[in-house]
Amino acid sequence: VGSSPGDTALTPRREQPAAEGTAFISIQAFPALLDLPQDLEVTEVSCGSRHTAVVTRGGELYTWGWGKYGQLGHGDNSSSDRPRRIEYLVAEGLQAEEVVCGPWTTYVHVLE
């Protein structure tokens, strides 16, 4: 099959650590299987440029990916290859109902 000048190929890309001691985060252009705790049922999923968020049936919010701008919601700018629960919502007695990820942001609709 021929290609036209405007065609581009998708290839996996790996984010390099910024400095020694910085966690390596894999940025992939293709879907990958992910293990969540077995008792979780996901009801909502949203993907940003380099991060993902899910809402569970129990109203918990889990995020992972690149967190340079705090878009993961863990109170810092750390990145994570594994889903991490947003502990702030749990501590405040809030339940996530919907999540929408923007390029560098995450918006969450919560219930008290």
Image (tube, grey):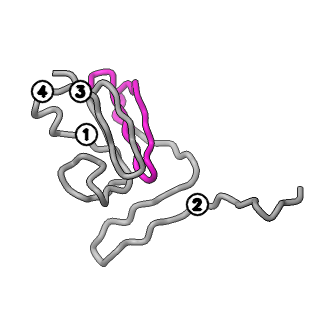
Q: Which residue is mark 3?
A: 110
The amino acid at mark 4 is Gly
Q: How many marks?
A: 4
Within-10-Å neighbours for mark 4: few <14, some 14–19, many 20+ = few
Q: Could you tell me which quadrant the N terminus lies in? A: bottom right
Magenta residues span: 36-59
Within-10-Å neighbours for mark 1: few <14, some 14–19, many 20+ = some
Q: Nearer the viewer, residue 27 or 69?
A: 69
Would residue 11 be found to the left or right of residue 83 on screen? right
The amino acid at mark 1 is Arg
Q: Which residue is mark 1?
A: 85
The amino acid at mark 2 is Pro
Q: Which residue is mark 2?
A: 12
Which one is earlier in the sequence, the residue at label 3 or at label 2?
Answer: 2
Residue at the image point whose x is 45% and y is 66% from the top? 15
Within-10-Å neighbours for mark 2: few <14, some 14–19, many 20+ = few
Against 58, is 1 above or below? below
Residue 93 numbered mark, or none: 4
